[in-house]
Image: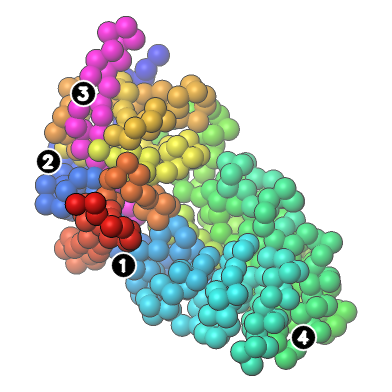
Amino acid sequence: MIERRELNSWQAPGYLEAREGRLTVDGVDAAALVDQYGSPLYVFSEKRIVGNTRNLRRAVEGVHTRVKVCYASKANSTMAVLAAVLRAGGDIEVNSGGELFKARTAGFKPEQIVFNGVSKTDDEIRAAIDFGILAINIDSLFELEQVTRAARELGKRANVAIRIVPEIITRSHIGLQTGLLSSKFGLSPSQIDEAFSRALAAPDAINLAGVHIHVGSQTPDLQPFARAFAEMWKFVAGLSKRTGHRIAHINIGGGLPIDYLGETPMAADIGEREREMLSATLDPGEVLRAALDEAAPSGKQELELIEGLTIIFEPGRRIIADTGLLLTSVCNIKERPETGDTWLLTDAGYSLALSMAMYKWYYHLISATRAKESHDTPYKVAGPLCDSGDVYFDLERGARLPNYRLLPQGTGPGDVLALLNTGAYALDQASQYNGRPKPAVVMIRESGEASVVRRAETYEDLVSLDNWVSSQ
């Protein structure tokens, strides 16, 4: 049974609000942005990106003074986003040569960059070594030899960190867990000592600077982070005692969650395990404190070692997810007399928010044009793509997504809807599937001015990279 009540828990004072009945972003009318820049439309808040970055830094620096917050640019590598993170005092994590190029172009310095990835090419590795980045996070013994060879060819010394996969299970989506031995990431614990030995045996080419771990994304509990840190600390402390080599940093990875649900009445239609994961919040300072407590360094040597370490975080979702939304217009409406369903067909499908289909991810949906009205009428909502999976609900009627969305009664063509908290991954994973050009990206600047930070693609862009000969 549908709970019919009005809950505007999606509102965030000073950011997302209902004013004069309409959704505003940093005081700017969202539906008016669609009128000006077209639909669909990605919208981001510069003020919130900066605020999230600074708040996270303050939280962890209150626990340990030597900290780096390396924004995981895979979550959203739009240049305006990178510039906002940099201005807020953030560093950056990249996952490809392309992301490294974007980071450099945005103005990040070598000592601000760490490089992840399971399958780095020789060219990507050479670019990272040549620029002198803080750390290449080594994902295998093969990659360590690959980096050693490239460094010697360049006549330079590569800064590396060894990535450990410790078999730590989290309560996140299985596709987002990266700390398992069944995953493709990192070296097994049984390989770490050999990796250390090989790195220390090549001092002309390798600077063993750190260790790295990442348990996954949207991790809802403190314990996996604490256990992961303690696992790394065991190797770091053991290495120091055996060889005297002092690691410069421990990289605890990313995965800090955000609350996608709030108090939405739709939450009752999502299974308990999924609901707990999607509504999780963790204080980053508490995460770091729990990690240090779990490691439990003792004795003068260990205490001096950990005090001298820089601790790196790689937050992506935590910085960018709740700073963006995807606006979409209702283009069509149809009734199904046999089922009693009313369908709303929009111009934004999973090609613009892939996680909806890939992970059955929940993004709260509200009316931008009628934000103040009660959202108590059930609709089947779907996008424009040519397959049945392009829907805003779970076709399998499982526990991941509600089987309908609640919107104001009478919602129909011409109304603008907003998918909230789509700042992470949606834009970077967007495609031109079905020959649909990707939409514009607008950022509400800290000044309150709206500006296009990525233009809308055109039909001409759909063929601009193709080499072909017309038959005409």
Q: Which residue is mark 3?
A: 333
Drawn side of residue 148 relative to residue 425, left or right: right
Q: Which residue is mark 1?
A: 80
Res 344 visible: yes
Q: Quadrant of residue 51?
A: bottom left
Q: CA distance from mark 4 to mark 1?
A: 40 Å
Q: From the viewer's side, name the closer residue of 367 and 197.
A: 197
Q: Are marks 4 and 2 in contact (CB under 8 Å)?
A: no
Color theme of the render: rainbow
Q: How many marks?
A: 4
Q: Which residue is mark 2?
A: 20
Q: CA distance from mark 4 to mark 2?
A: 66 Å
Q: Which residues are magenta?
A: 322-346
Q: CA distance from mark 1 to mark 2?
A: 30 Å
Residue that appears at 50% across and 39% down: 359
Q: Which residue is mark 4?
A: 202
Q: Earlier in the sequence, mark 3 or mark 4?
A: 4
Q: Quadrant of residue 244?
A: bottom right
**What predominant SS class does the magenta segment belong to?**
strand
In the rendered image, the vertical position of residue 210 relative to residue 468, given as above or below: below
Identify the amino acid type marked 3.
Ile
Q: Quadrant of residue 329?
A: top left
Q: CA distance from mark 3 to mark 4?
A: 66 Å
Identify the amino acid type marked 4.
Ala
**Crowd tier of the residue under label 3, counting other residues whose Cα lies within 10 Å: few below 14, some 14–19, many 20 or above:** some
